[in-house]
Image: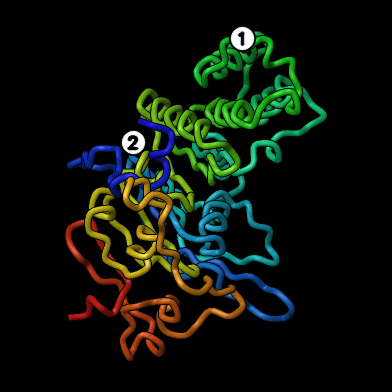
Amino acid sequence: MHKNSLFRNNNLPKRSCKRLMASNPILQIEDLSITLAKQRQQYPIVQSLSFTINEGQTLAIIGESGSGKSVSAHAILRLLPCPPFSVSGQVNFQGHNLLTASRSIQKKIIGTEISMIFQNPQASLNPVFTIEQQFREIIHTHLALTAEVAKEKMLYALEETGFHDPRLCLNLYPHQLSGGMLQRICIAMALLCSPKLLIADEPTTALDVSVQYQILQLLKTLQKKTGMSLLIITHNMGVVAETADDVLVLYAGRMVECAPAVQMFHNPSHPYTRDLLASRPSLQPQQLGSFNPIPGQPPHYTAFPSGCRYHPRCSKILNRCSAEAPEIYPVREGHKVRCWLYDD
């Protein structure tokens, strides 16, 4: 695949639409709501978000900045400070609701069975410690290993993520490595405990296009090798096309569409999803560089509009859209949309 296909290239996902006939859910989110207390006001950041990730599959959550993607991922791992945030609903991981589980259960799961890599690898690593020291901190926290076994595990993790001289890498400081190398190190650290679920929050945003492709290929290879599930947080439809089995579209804190990736690209149902796909730069010779930007701006969480939150920007607006929040309607098997256009 040419590196530029991370942008617009025929609107087609690269993964096959292989569906597991007897899928086993590994993560089930039910009615997840996140509220921010600020200046004596309560602001709904995310409202009634529900989705399921099956074993070995990849779900991509996509939306513009401020849609609630990253804050939802942080809520799953209990990373949001309380106060000012409050979280309700259920985050069920293999029979445990992480929002109400004991600290011992949370410690057993978070960082071990569920790991996360963050958007900015430079900010994820401590600049005053070597790579080896930071590996050892993770091992000390989550794994009971001897120093010798721990060293072997570090070297193996670095080899698996593409380092040809892992011993040299362990002696370096973060500032001595490129952004792509730092992201590989973060992936290696996240996989130390052999997680069943890896959450990747904008894993390629801070990288140039050619390195983006390498990181995505690495994640796919590691997923195939280990059988882990992936939750990808992104604003880039190219990343979705390259990685996802299923796609969930967020807008202003609400799910507006969820579908298998192939259906999402071939038959998007929500006006926002259609506009999002149309807004990508074209690589077709006759339309090179052209794109159709979505009019207006996403609403701020302090001033979400009434009714459908997309109605101020929507070209398909109905009379009821500005007054009534739409329900979720099934479009076809595995495909649902929150839009009044589908109210029969």
**Vertical arrangement, residue 289 with respect to residue 166, above or below:** below
Amino acid type shown at disc 2: Gly
What residue is shown at x 48% (from left), y 50% (from top)?
234
The residue under label 1 is 165
Q: Residues within 10 Å of mark 1 (few under 14, many from 20)?
A: few
Q: Looking at the rendering, which quadrant does residue 14 occupy?
A: top left
In the figure, is residue 170 to the left or right of 213? Answer: right
What residue is shown at x 67% (from left), y 31% (from top)?
141
In the figure, is residue 74 to the left or right of 55? Answer: right
**Vertical arrangement, residue 299 with respect to residue 130, above or below:** below
**Vertical arrangement, residue 227 with respect to residue 66, above or below:** above
Q: Residues within 10 Å of mark 2 (few under 14, many from 20)?
A: many
Amino acid type shown at disc 1: Asp
Q: Specify which label sits upstream in the sequence, 2 or 1.
A: 2
Residue 56: numbered disc: 2
**Vertical arrangement, residue 58 with respect to residue 149, above or below:** below
Quadrant of the frame with the N terminus: top left
Q: Disc count in the image?
A: 2
Q: Looking at the rendering, which quadrant does residue 217 occupy?
A: top left
Q: How was this image coloured? A: rainbow
Assign a secondary structure to mark 1.
loop
Front residue of 66 and 117: 66
2 vs 1, front mark: 1
What residue is shown at x 64% (from left), y 25% (from top)?
139
Assign a secondary structure to mark 2.
loop
What residue is shown at x 44% (from left), y 31% (from top)?
219
Quadrant of the frame with the C terminus: bottom left
Residue 222 locus on image (x, y percent) = 42, 26
Front residue of 251 and 189: 251
